[in-house]
Amino acid sequence: MSFLLVLFLACLLDLIFGDPRWLPHPVRLIGRVALLAESLTRKLPVTAYKSGRLTVLIVLCCTGGACLGLFFLLSSSSQPLFILGATLALYTTLAARDLIFHARQVVDALALDMETARKQVGMIVGRDTDQLDTAGIVRACVESVAENMSDGIIAPLFWSLIGAGLGQSLSGTPIIWGVTAAMLYKAVNTMDSIFGYKNTRYLQFGSSAAHLDDLVNFLPARISGISLVLASLLCRCDMKNSFRILRRDRKQHSSPNAGWPEAAMAGALGIQLGGDSSYFGKITQKPTIGDALVRPVTTHIFQANTLILLASLLCLLFFSALYALFLF
């Protein structure tokens, strides 16, 4: 049960502190390693696709090796210090507080002026934001909150529990396996954010990272969508509509995974997400998700934050219960 202690402490630390900018963060280090690996593998006499695959392998090996090295150092320390080190490592894979904080910053910016709000939402989405109105800003923010719930909260929790379960059954070291699995997930997710662009530079090179990211997010994204439907009942949102839109529009997204939490969120709030967006000055046509029962307003950002917190709590309790049953 020591892993569950580490897991709950890590979640608590994330809710209290988030991601302090002054603290060296493993994800930023993983990003530097990924860029360094890219610069090295692109010099090899192989195709861009093979260079990308080799880069993914290098980053995963470095990440896993760093985690195992950390635990090797902690293994000779006392049990409390070992628990503390594992907790801090797992804590860095979670991003609930930061996700909510950035969404709240958009709300605060909307209270000032449109130009500030456009710049603020532009920090959390990839689309052009200089022409968005209030509804467009709210829509973009809610989409980001819903999609990043899976990447930043549910997936690290999911893979840490999977790793812990494997560690318990194979070697009796669930903490080491659980934290390492969560960190490996963050490595995959980080590589996708760096290399997963469909442009000339990364279309071939980044395909391996993008496909691997789709694979490791397959189950977490679907769990996120279902948990948002359940959370909508606790938030007194429209649970019936959330489930209806999830079933209808979950595939209305270019990503095989992002449509699940976005559809559930759109249905719960009664707003329409997706639709045509501008990227680098060019309009990209995208299908809509949800029905425009009401116009998006700032209140919907607060509701989205509440929904992801409750949905994440439900997932944490569910995952923990499954792990506890597995132990006994």
Image: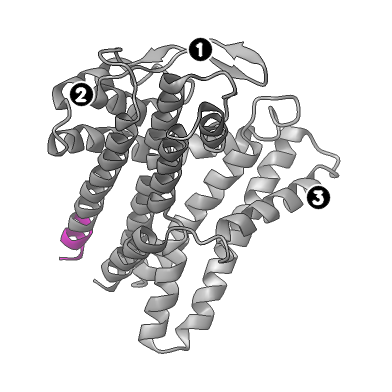
Q: Residues within 10 Å of mark 2 (few under 14, many from 20)?
A: many
Amino acid type shown at disc 1:
Asp
Number of the front mark, 2 or 1: 1
Q: Could you say which disc has been placed on residue 243 in the image? A: 2
Amino acid type shown at disc 2:
Phe
Q: On the image, numbered disc 3 is attached to which residue?
A: 40
Q: Residues within 10 Å of mark 1 (few under 14, many from 20)?
A: few
Q: Residue at x 30, y 19 (%)?
A: 271
Q: Earlier in the sequence, mark 3 or mark 2?
A: 3
Q: Is residue 324 located in the magenta-colored stretch of the structure?
A: yes
Judged from the image, the secondary structure of the residue bearing numbered disc 1 is loop
Q: Residue 53 or 271: which is nearer the viewer?
A: 271
Judged from the image, the secondary structure of the residue bearing numbered disc 2 is helix
Q: Residue at x 38, y 41 (%)?
A: 149
Amino acid type shown at disc 3:
Leu
- Residue span colored magenta: 322-328
Task: Look at the picture and state if 133 lies above or below 309.
Answer: above
Quadrant (top left, top right, bottom left, bottom right) of the C terminus: bottom left
* CB contact under 8 Å: marks 3 and 2: no
Q: Is residue 300 left or right of residue 236?
A: right
Q: Earlier in the sequence, mark 2 or mark 1?
A: 2
Task: Look at the picture and state if 66 lies above or below 231.
Answer: below
Number of the front mark, 1 or 3: 1
Q: Residue at x 28, y 46 (%)?
A: 309
Rendered image quadrant of residue 84? bottom left
Quadrant (top left, top right, bottom left, bottom right) of the N terminus: bottom left
Q: Could you say which disc has been placed on residue 205 in the image? A: none
Q: Earlier in the sequence, mark 1 or mark 3?
A: 3
Number of disc labels: 3
Q: Residue at x 66, y 41 (%)?
A: 53
Q: Could you say which disc has been placed on residue 276 in the image? A: 1
What x and y, as percent, mark residue 245? 26, 18
